[in-house]
Amino acid sequence: MTLQFPIKSDTSKKIWSAFERELNHKLKPLPESERDDIKMEILSHLYESALNDKANSEENRIINAIDRLGEPDLYLTPLIEDILQAQSAAEGQPKAIVLSLLKTTQKSLWHLALTAIFAFGYFISIIIFIMGIMHIFNSNVGIWLDDNGGLLSLSFSFQPDAIQWMPEQFSFIAITLSAFTYWGLSKLLYLLFLKPKKLGFKQ
Amino acid sequence: MLPDQIIDRWLPQFRKGLLEFIILLKLQQGMSYGYEIASEIKHLTSIEVAEGTLYPLLNRLKRDGLVTTEWKTEDIGTPRKYYQITKTGIETLDKMKLIWTNTHSSVLKMVMQS
């Protein structure tokens, strides 16, 4: 806490310090001069916002001011990305370019992994669902376990050296589980990628 | 997709562009700082801003050379980072005003006809 922001009560000091620590942590990727500049600007805003707040106690005024600023990630992430990107482009340093490429690659790999996981999940849930339906008409369709090692396989026909897994309940389990998995994957997909991102502009 | 979901997606984009315009309009009246800009936007428009989100916009305006900044310490003792519109900023704002006026009239006409 700096002398420029005189906070009186101990509780307020703790809240202020916690917020300042969070800023320090999140601003770490930036060079020191940029970091100090942004931190000072945010803290200056916070202090003035708290001064003008109508709440009775200093603690509540600071909490309200932090709340009005919004989630730090909401404004610091785009700010940091913008500054770093501008610096990399301006400097044209090989290290900056490599770091930027690594970051992009990391993001692409992450997206590729998620796409593979979701595609596999959907594929399996649809296959199991179809097998569940088919099992009603053909009892050989189902999951078969190898006699020796218990190796699991999905099969549409009778397997001579294997035992069928729960043939009586297979249709029910397969249809229920696959429908639930399909719903879960869709919900997860929506939450991760399709849900409108909160940009901080409220109605 | 439901109309509300579409509005949820459209509104932030619409407001984001509008906010840069509003910030430049405010700075054309004189230099100002983050908290004051945020308060004025809340006071004068129906746009309620999560105040922190102004800073990425202000940073972009600075990077694009539309504003400059200067730290000043006020009587109350707190330092404030003031933003001042540049010549390029004023030229850009004039173009934005023209686009806004034309678009606004056209859209208003279409809304009235619908």
Image: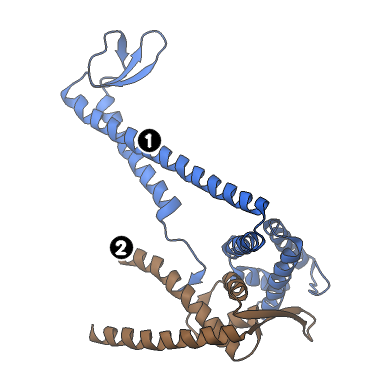
Chain colours: A blue, B brown
Q: Could you tell me which secondary element the residue under label 2 belongs to?
A: loop
Quadrant of the drawing holding the C terminus of chain B = bottom left
Residue visible at 17% across and 22% down? A138
Q: Nearer the viewer, residue A181 or A8?
A: A181
Badge 1 marks a residue whose secondary structure is helix
Give the percent coordinates (x, y) of residue B79: 76, 78
- Horizontally, is A36 left or right of A98 in the view? right
- Name the amino acid type tagged 1: Phe
Tag of residue A160: none
Q: Which residue is at a point 66% across and 68% down the rendered structure image?
A: A63
Q: Name the residue that disc number 2 marks.
A: B2
Answer above or below: position of A153 versus A22: above
Residue at screen point 36% across, 46% down: A186
Instruction: Indicate which label's residue lies in the foreground, 1 or 2.
Output: 1
Mark 1 vs 2: CB contact within 8 A: no
- Inspect the image, locate mark 2, and give the three-letter code of the amino acid beneath it: Leu
Residue at the far bottom: name it: B29
- Residue A14 appears at what percent x and percent y? 76, 62
Residue at mark 1:
A120
- Judge whether A122 appears above or below A3 on screen: above
Q: CA distance from mark 1 to mark 2?
A: 28 Å
Q: Is residue A112 at all visible to an observer of this figure?
A: yes
Residue A99 location (% of width, % of height): 63, 50
Residue A152, percent across and down? 37, 19
Indicate left or right for A9 with A110 as reference: right
* Quarter of image, res A122: top left
